[in-house]
Image (cartoon, rainbow, N blue to C red):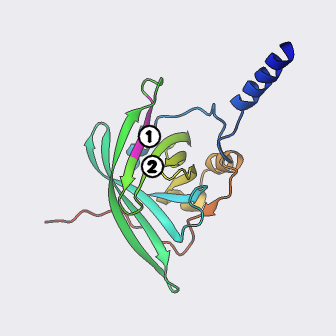
Amino acid sequence: MIFTFAILFCMQAAAANVLRPGNFLNDTPILDIRSLTQVTGPLVVVNRTHHIESEYRCLTAEMVQNLSVTQYAYELRAGKYNGTSFVYGTEKVTVNLTEVKNRTGVYEASYYSSKTNLTANLTLEMKDTTNSCFVIWVRNSDYESGCELLVKDSQLEHIPQGCKDYYEENCTAPSLQLHNSSCIYEPFTPLQC
């Protein structure tokens, strides 16, 4: 009986330390994702550890309208190389913020993409003090989840070392580099009537 209890206890202790697949420890603190809504200009996805087979590169997300305290319109942009240059496409999505369970005042985000037919749930795992870089955890409805390293477009040449280190140390699954020097990042410009 004691032996069975000891094995069960060891299994529970091991399960408590299980890594999210190739990424964060389960007890990684979740930060308030509302920090991202304060960023002006495009956020560039530099690297990610999910959907690494994708042909799309040069991904950006930019808040284009504050719809309410917990709802924002974002423009997502991605480029696909056609052999000579990147051809870009855009999609507008509505991002909804919800309070993290048992974490008063800490929010996570979700949105649905009609282009990918996926719902993505986003939690903020790390950010720098100037809100110029972020590491987020993305849970996709197709069960491909992973990290993303996001950087303000103005910081691409000088990505804060803390963000790079955090991504490299905690996002250990195979990673896809989405940013390269051929990418063109243009801020969203609303139509003037």
- Residue 107 in percent (x, y) is at 43, 34
Element at label 1: helix
* Position of 184 relative to 153 (above/below): below
Q: Give the amino acid at mark 2.
A: Ala
The residue segment tinted magenta is: 106-110
- Write the residue at 54% across / 46% down: 136
Left or right: residue 191 compared with residue 155: left
- Residue 167 in percent (x, y) is at 64, 49
Tell me which corner region of the image, top left, top right, bottom left or bottom right, holds residue 20. Answer: top right
* Position of 24 relative to 172 (above/below): above
* Residue under label 2: 120
Residue neighbourhood size for the residue with mark 1, other residues' Cα within 10 Å, grouped as few (<14), some (14–19), many (≥20): some
- Write the residue at 17% across / 65% down: 192
Q: Give the amino acid at mark 1.
A: Ser
Residue neighbourhood size for the residue with mark 2, other residues' Cα within 10 Å, grouped as few (<14), some (14–19), many (≥20): many
For the residues labelled 2 and 1, the Cα–Cα distance comes to 18 Å
* Position of 145 relative to 30 (above/below): below
